[in-house]
Image (tube, grey):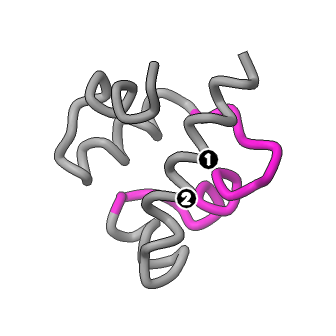
């Protein structure tokens, strides 16, 4: 199970957070706490709640199912 969480977090970190102006900007734009963004950026990953993933997908204007397709699940 942790492999899936790590895969989710790595995708978000590499494709979206790293390209944002800052961690704070990403958090603000995605209706998240900056602490949550730091957890996503951890090398070991983070057990990301579905609600957090939903907020990120809503801000990106994609469905959660589309997100899972992006990461190959």
| Quadrant showing the C terminus | top left
Q: Position of residue 67 (x, y in %)?
A: 34, 33
Write the residue at 35% across / 59% down.
30
Q: Residue furthest front?
A: 72
Instruction: Confirm or deny contact between disc 1 and disc 2 (CB under 8 A).
Output: yes
Could you say which quadrant of the image residue 8 lies in? top right
* Residue at which label 1 appears: 10
Could you say which quadrant of the image residue 7 lies in? top right
- For the residue carrying disc 2, how many other residues have a C-alpha within 10 Å: few (<14), some (14-19), or many (20+)? few
Write the residue at 61% across / 47% down.
10
Residue 62, placed above or below residue 31: above
Q: Residue furthest left?
A: 61
* Residue at which label 2 appears: 14
Identify the magenta region: 30-48
Q: Position of residue 55 (x, y in %)?
A: 35, 44
Write the residue at 53% across / 70% down.
18
Residue 47 belongs to the span the image colors magenta? yes
Q: Residue furthest right?
A: 44
Magenta span dominant secondary structure: loop
- For the residue carrying disc 1, how many other residues have a C-alpha within 10 Å: few (<14), some (14-19), or many (20+)? many
Residue 48, placed above or below residue 28: above
Q: Position of residue 31 (x, y in %)?
A: 37, 58
Residue 23 belongs to the span the image colors magenta? no
Q: How many marks?
A: 2
Residue 47, placed above or below residue 10: above
CA gap between label 1 and label 2 equals 6 Å
Q: On the rendered structure, is 61 left or right of 35?
A: left
| Quadrant showing the N terminus | top right
Q: On the rendered structure, is 69 left or right of 10?
A: left
Say which element carries label 1. helix
Say which element carries label 2. helix
Write the residue at 46% across / 40% down.
52
């Amino acid at each position: 199970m942790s492999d899936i969480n790590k895969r989710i977090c790595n995708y978000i970190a590499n494709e979206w957070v790293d390209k944002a102006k800052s961690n704070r900007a990403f958090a603000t734009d995605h209706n998240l706490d900056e602490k949550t963004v730091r957890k996503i950026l951890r090398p070991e990953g983070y057990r990301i709640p579905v609600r957090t993933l939903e907020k990120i997908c809503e801000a990106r204007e994609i469905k959660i199912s589309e997100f899972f397709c992006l990461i190959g699940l």
